[in-house]
Image (tube, helix red, strand yellow):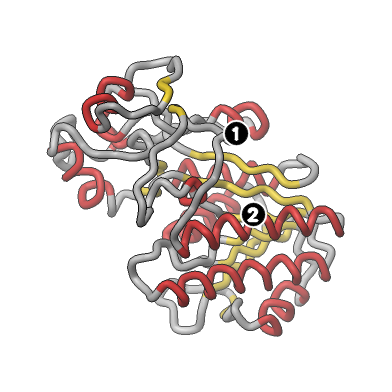
Amino acid sequence: MDVLVTGAAGKVGRAVVPVLRSAGHRVVATDLPGTAFPADVHADLIDAGQADALIGSARFEAVVHAAAIPSPGQHPPHVVFANNMMATFNVIEACVRSDVRRLVNISSVGVLGLHYAKRRILPDYLPIDEQHRLRPQDPYGLSKLFGEQLCDAAVCRSDLRCISLRPAWVQDSASYAADLGPLIRAGQPQGVAGWPYTDVLDLAEAVRLAAESDLPGHEAFYIAAPDTIGGVDLHASWRTANPGSATQLRLVPRPDASGIDSGKAQRLLGWHATHSWRDYLTDTGEPR
């Protein structure tokens, strides 16, 4: 297929482009002008004209939309929301106008509202699946949720088919030691979502499967490694970290099962994680 990948200079985009190319797809990589990572085309997707010109310039069969400000803390709230919301809106509109067959929208577990919450909330149950209610408070989580709603609207009025992937905390070889190492060394990490994470190579494989999928309509999938950060016991650690919590602890296939259930992606996409924090860190959180 001819595939466009937005946000190609980001952590996710850098992993997705080579995976798609290795699968035989013809990929056009795009990002903002001035990005250090080489892109085939530069465009600012907040500009509707640039988004339309980019997506309308070739007969793309699939678009992977990974471009976004990846968290709420680095920019003012209105910048995060406006950037993520308008870029997604413009990409979807351009896909509809250009008769793109498949959009893979990179969403986030941020749609749950558990992370970055001004008023702390806990999940109704663990592990969390796609039936769990969504309650984002922050501009990042809200932008991702509204992006999914834009996908819902698009499939109702066009032949576009959408898949939204909601990865947990995405890690690559350069980030495991800095992000996960301190949590593992702490011995008893705090957490509001059951200590999930995702290896970026596993996410890239989920993107490939989503781009190649023939699923109708719009489907959302959580993507996470099957285990917890540091291999902590999900139930025992949750009771220690959140005493008195009303969160229902459901049966799990293994003591260190992730707080995010990726079973739907396994069933409908055929996706399975093959990378672990243990590939990069020791049991004490030190780099291998």
Residue type, mark 1 in image: Gln
Q: Viewed as shown, does residue 219 lie left or right of 31?
A: right
Q: Residues within 10 Å of mark 1 (few under 14, many from 20)?
A: few
Q: Which residue is mark 2?
A: 148
Residue 237: image quadrant is top left
Q: Position of residue 147 (x, y in %)?
A: 62, 60
Residue 90: image quadrant is bottom right
Image quadrant in which the N terminus is located: bottom right
Residue 25: image quadrant is bottom right
Above or below: residue 242 compared with residue 110: above
Q: Which residue is mark 1?
A: 131
Q: Position of residue 177 (x, y in %)?
A: 21, 47
Q: Position of residue 249 (x, y in %)?
A: 41, 21
Q: Residue at x 75, y 64 (%)?
A: 60
Q: Position of residue 160 (x, y in %)?
A: 80, 56
Q: Viewed as shown, does residue 204 lie left or right of 220?
A: left
Above or below: residue 244 compared with residue 152: above
